[in-house]
Amino acid sequence: MRKRTLLLSIVVAGIAGAAAFGWVTIRRGFSARDNPSAMEAYVAKTARKLSIPASEREAKNPFAPTTEVLREARAHFADHCAICHGNDGSGKTEIGQNLYPKAPDMRQSETQSLTDGQLYYIIHNGIRLTGMPAWGGPDKDNDSWRLVLFIRHLPQMNTQEMKEMEQFNPKSPAERSEEQEEEQFLNEDQPSNHAVKPSRQKH
């Protein structure tokens, strides 16, 4: 009898807690401008941790952080990831700061404390109910493992590396058009483009 009463009390408390959480959420609205509450953040992090199989969490990176591997990963990150995370991994971009939850600063311990396997799994499979897409296909992919190495390197990034990444950042149609106009204007001023037209002499 006592066990039944205790179980009933737990169920009632759970329902009451869920109802209270729902009421507060509705009262606050569903705006993506807000920061997740402490409870939401805790539940989300716990769910993310539990969703990654133990075998995946302990997976080892098959790549070493060589200069060439990091160069490839840097270019890939600039082209695919920086639009939300920024070239420096800070998440301080227009899109990154308007997501719910906001893009994290991957240089900080919250990201750096994850295992290589966890980072790979998140990149490869994405995270539901966030702005993080799944970048990998059905099979293992080397690009995601290289990105893990680059994420580890983020706290040591230097100005020169970030400058080099800018050439790989996606450009809007307006930016591409402006570059083409500038290139065309500069090319018109080159001596080779001002060829002397042959004179037509009457015989």
Image: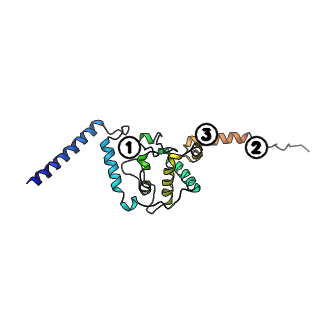
Image quarter hosting the C terminus:
top right
Mark whose residue sits in front, 1 or 3: 1
In the structure shown, which secondary structural element does the residue marked by tag 1 occupy?
loop
Badge 2 marks a residue whose secondary structure is helix
- Residue 178 is labelled as 3
Marks 2 and 3, how far apart at CA: 21 Å
User: Which residue is rendered at x = 51% and y = 44% of the image?
Assistant: 88
Instruction: Give, as a three-letter code, the residue at label 1.
Output: Pro
User: Whole-percent x and y of residue 47?
Assistant: 32, 52
Is 50 on the left-hand or right-hand side of 63? left
Location of mark 2 (residue): 193
Q: Earlier in the sequence, mark 2 or mark 3?
A: 3
Tell me: 6 left or right of 172: left
Can you name the residue that lies furthest to the right here?
203
At label 1, counting other C-alpha atoms closer than 10 Å, the crowd grade (few under 14, some 14-19, many 20 or more) is: many
Residue located at (44% from left, 56% from top):
116
**Quarter of the figure with the N terminus:** bottom left
Q: From mark 1 to mark 3, how far is it between C-alphas?
A: 34 Å
Query: How far across and how far down the image is residue 37, in percent?
Result: 32, 40
Instruction: Give 18 or 154, whichever is nearer the viewer.
Output: 154
Question: How far apart are the two marked residues, 2 and 1, measured between alpha carbons?
Answer: 53 Å
- Residue at position x 32%, y 51% in the image: 46
Question: Residue shown at 25%/42% (left/top)?
Answer: 21
